[in-house]
């Protein structure tokens, strides 16, 4: 049976009644207290943006855009589709997710009709419909909202503030909005993401901006959101991608996860716990500097991958909608149902939006539905038509993106069992015995599970308490949680790692649910809750201090050396748990309040062992203040100045040519990494041939980093700059529609005849921009 809310929660969730006259003032004060957490969270969010150089006007414009073009239309539609109101924060959070989906449709329609200058009007169309149709007007001011527990509000606010602070420490502090000198470094993917946002701003359908006209079968929906912020909010794309979008979507993830967990489990605080596990607790590690040896889930992903972060907000909302539809008819949850018609409509909207937000989202969702369907069929011997219907909806969305968006591109995915872990236990010389190699494989596997999945520990007691007889929604969550790691182990490449990241929200909600069941069985008094909370904070702080003081540097030597600190630290904590466990029963005889509470204490400690993860990743970034601690490339101010000049003096359909193709300043003959994206990024224009490594057609191709597929075109591009002729430049202009040639003289100076055949428009010493005549 689904466990409902506790008696205390039932009281705080009672509907608001009309106040007596003498009660008005106290209730107004209470209302102010209820809004205080939101005000504090918003204030912290704004302060962090302002102290990191975000213009005040851009912050206001962003806030206006989110309210006007995301939350407002999305909330109205969500209210139309859901049956009974639950809480205002749920309407706004799920409404924002629906608004992101509607934004995609608006962008596509207005772009197709070439009405981008009027794209700001699309929310007005929604507003007009809800204002003009009498039956829809009630959705402007619905009644019957339930009061949100104040503790829940403060917990979620804490998650948002912590996460925004983490983004400041890892990303903002190391990366100015615009390069500030010739020695500025930048994480290599950031200009690529900026270039895709520029492409979405100017073209439909989208193409690869680094190779003009090249198809882009890619998950690009996140960059439509960035483009829409810029087009409607009138915010520079650099400010959007380098400041506003990551913390904004992060805050939405926290809210959506908290309300999704509440709706699915029937407990407000289980949702807040899921949000904390998502954005506060990180990977389980024990090295002086945050390590990516075994992979990462949230740390290092939320800011370098806009698509992953954006997709989580939509995916969690989709999980909540499907989970609500799978609830048992006889459950005693105080959360009102969405209603099947509305749930199916919302699932269709969110599945479509999730489909090309990240290619990994829907496969794990389908796996969760498949496991739930099989288990319900086996246990009840009835066809679960709701599950079948949801499966059809999600499958159709997957088919749409596979055929229309991705064009059946596989991105190098293939069956390579354990390919992601084999390098860690590889023994190419065969020097280890069978037993030794088996031990290494087991150690690496255990370390991966500990590092990447320890936040899901609550699933184990849930399955134990339920004795394996899970409800359909629990099977769905479990299937989604297992699908990601299983696909990663089966497919084995780096691109397969996105599957276990997509599966994370499924497992976190189920893990929080398991913790809730253990909590209920402990029957904690209010005093015990306070003690446990204080103890959890002390334990988390102690673990962090231990990592800061005693964690070693990343060991080297053997292939498996990188996992040894994780195993050692797990051993230390396990030994500590055993000592406390042996002492618990004798202590309970002396202090009866400890009896029956060991399980909840142990599970809380396990879930909190990853607390240092995000903090250590922030520390890693601070050790590399210029660009952060990940793969960086030069982003000289002079290059960006030239690109911005082109943007200001060109039409969005103009093509540019350049002599820069590599991530670093090396001649083309010595180039082994053609990941150059700066020109297309900061000019917001397509380049004839810039850097081609990220072209979807090259995914999985061994020499893709340096070998362009059209060598004649590349040679023509460079010769037009180094050995120009009137015939070549005419061809460049007439056949390839190139307007400007952008030359980096530090790499190699342009040919002497170029100034005679083209007009020099910009020159800052290092960079020159010529306009073809």
Image (tube, helix red, strand yellow):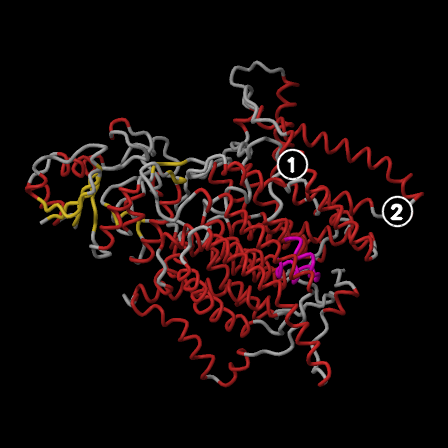
Residue 251 belongs to magenta span: no
Figure quadrant of residue 575:
top right
Residue at image location 34% in from the left, 36% down from the top:
183
Instruction: Classify mark 2: helix, strand or loop.
Output: loop
Considering only order in the chain, which callout, 1 or 2, is on the residue closer to the N terminus? 1
Which residue is at the front of the view, 562 or 385? 562
Q: Are marks 2 and 1 in contact (CB under 8 Å)?
A: no
Q: Which residues are magenta?
A: 258-274
Figure quadrant of residue 513:
bottom right
Examine the residues drawn in magenta and state their main secondary structure. Answer: helix
Residue at image location 39% in from the left, 57% down from the top:
224
Measure how far apart labels 2 and 1 are at the Cα level: 28 Å
**Total tally of numbered discs in the picture:** 2
Q: Which residue is mark 2?
A: 595
Query: Would residue 698 appear left or right of 244 to someone viewing this image?
Result: left
> Compared to 577, does 441 lie above or below?
above
The circle drawn on residue 410 is: none
Residue 260 belongs to magenta span: yes
Q: Is residue 377 visible?
A: no
Horizontal and vertical percent position of residue 127: 44, 77
Which residue is at the front of the view, 397 or 640? 640
User: Mark 2 packing: few (<14 Cα in 10 Å), some, or many (20+)?
Assistant: some
Which residue is at the front of the view, 339 or 128? 128
Q: Which residue is mark 1?
A: 450
Horizontal and vertical percent position of residue 11: 76, 69
Horizontal and vertical percent position of residue 108: 35, 63
Quadrant housing the N terminus = bottom right
């Amino acid at each position: 049976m689904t466990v409902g809310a506790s008696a205390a929660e039932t009281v705080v969730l009672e509907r608001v009644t009309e106040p007596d006259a003498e009660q008005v003032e106290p209730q107004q004060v209470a209302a102010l207290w209820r809004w205080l957490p939101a005000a504090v969270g918003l204030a912290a969010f704004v302060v962090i943006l302002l102290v990191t150089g975000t213009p005040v006007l851009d912050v206001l414009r962003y806030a206006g855009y989110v309210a006007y073009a995301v939350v407002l239309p999305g909330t109205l539609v969500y209210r139309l589709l859901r049956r009974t109101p639950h809480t205002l924060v749920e309407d706004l959070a799920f409404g924002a997710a629906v608004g992101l989906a509607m934004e995609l449709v608006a962008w596509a329609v207005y772009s197709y009709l070439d009405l981008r200058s009027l794209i700001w009007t699309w929310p007005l169309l929604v507003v007009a419909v809800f204002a003009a149709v009498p039956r829809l007007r009630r959705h402007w001011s619905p009644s019957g909202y339930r009061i949100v527990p104040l503790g829940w509000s403060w917990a979620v606010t804490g998650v948002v503030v912590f996460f925004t602070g983490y983004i400041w420490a890892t990303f903002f502090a190391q990366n100015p909005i615009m390069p500030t000198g010739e020695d500025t470094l930048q994480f290599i993917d950031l200009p690529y993401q900026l270039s895709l946002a520029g492409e979405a701003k100017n073209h439909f359908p989208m193409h690869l901006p680094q190779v003009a006209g090249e198809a882009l079968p890619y998950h690009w929906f996140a960059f439509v959101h960035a483009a829409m912020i810029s087009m409607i909010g009138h915010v520079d794309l650099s400010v959007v991608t380098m400041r506003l979008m990551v913390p904004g979507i992060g805050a939405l993830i926290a809210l959506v996860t908290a309300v999704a967990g509440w709706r699915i489990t029937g407990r407000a605080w289980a949702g807040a716990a899921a949000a904390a596990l998502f954005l506060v607790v990180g990977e389980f590690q024990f090295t002086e500097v945050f390590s990516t040896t075994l992979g990462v889930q949230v740390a290092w992903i939320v800011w370098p991958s806009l698509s992953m972060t954006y997709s989580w907000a939509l995916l969690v909302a989709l999980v909540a909608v499907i989970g609500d539809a799978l609830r048992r008819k006889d459950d005693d949850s105080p959360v009102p149902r969405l209603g099947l018609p509305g749930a199916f409509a919302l699932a269709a909207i969110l599945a479509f939006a999730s489909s090309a937000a990240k290619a990994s989202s829907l496969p794990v969702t389908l796996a969760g539905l498949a496991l739930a369907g099989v288990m319900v069929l086996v246990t009840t011997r009835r066809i679960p038509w709701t599950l079948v219907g949801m499966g059809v909806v999600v499958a159709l969305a997957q088919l749409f993106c596979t055929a229309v968006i991705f064009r059946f591109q596989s991105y190098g995915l293939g069956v390579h069992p354990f390919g992601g872990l084999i390098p860690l236990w590889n023994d190419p010389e065969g020097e280890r015995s069978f037993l030794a190699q088996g031990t290494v494989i087991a150690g690496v596997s255990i370390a991966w599970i500990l590092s990447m999945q320890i936040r899901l520990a609550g699933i184990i007691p849930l399955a134990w308490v339920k004795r394996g007889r899970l409800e359909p929604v629990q099977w769905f969550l479990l299937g989604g949680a297992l699908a990601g790691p299983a696909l990663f182990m089966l497919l084995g490449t780096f691109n397969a790692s996105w599957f276990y990241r997509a599966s994370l929200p499924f497992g976190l909600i189920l893990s929080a649910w398991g913790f809730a069941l253990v909590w209920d069985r402990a029957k904690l008094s209010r005093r015990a809750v306070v003690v446990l909370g204080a103890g959890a904070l002390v334990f988390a702080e102690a673990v962090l201090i231990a990592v800061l003081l005693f964690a070693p540097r990343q060991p080297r030597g053997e292939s498996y050396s990188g996992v040894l600190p994780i195993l050692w630290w797990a051993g230390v904590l396990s030994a500590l748990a055993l000592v406390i466990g042996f002492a618990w029963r004798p202590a309970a005889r002396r202090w009866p309040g400890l009896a029956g509470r060991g399980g909840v204490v142990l599970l809380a400690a396990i879930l909190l062992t990853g607390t240092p993860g995000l903090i250590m990743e922030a520390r890693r970034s601070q050790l590399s203040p210029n660009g952060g601690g990940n793969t960086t490339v030069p982003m000289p101010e002079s290059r960006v100045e030239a690109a911005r000049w082109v943007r200001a003096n060109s039409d969005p359909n103009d093509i540019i040519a350049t002599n820069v193709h590599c991530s670093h300043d090396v001649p083309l003959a010595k180039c082994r990494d053609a990941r150059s994206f700066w020109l297309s990024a900061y000019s917001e224009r397509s380049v004839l041939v810039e850097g081609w490594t990220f072209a979807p057609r090259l995914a999985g191709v061994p020499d893709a980093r340096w070998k362009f597929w059209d060598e004649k075109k590349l040679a023509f591009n460079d010769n037009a700059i180094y050995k120009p002729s009137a015939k070549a430049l005419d061809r460049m202009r007439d056949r390839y529609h190139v307007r400007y040639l952008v030359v980096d003289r530090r790499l190699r100076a342009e040919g002497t005849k170029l100034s005679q055949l083209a007009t020099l428009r910009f020159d800052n010493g290092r960079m020159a921009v010529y306009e073809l005549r």
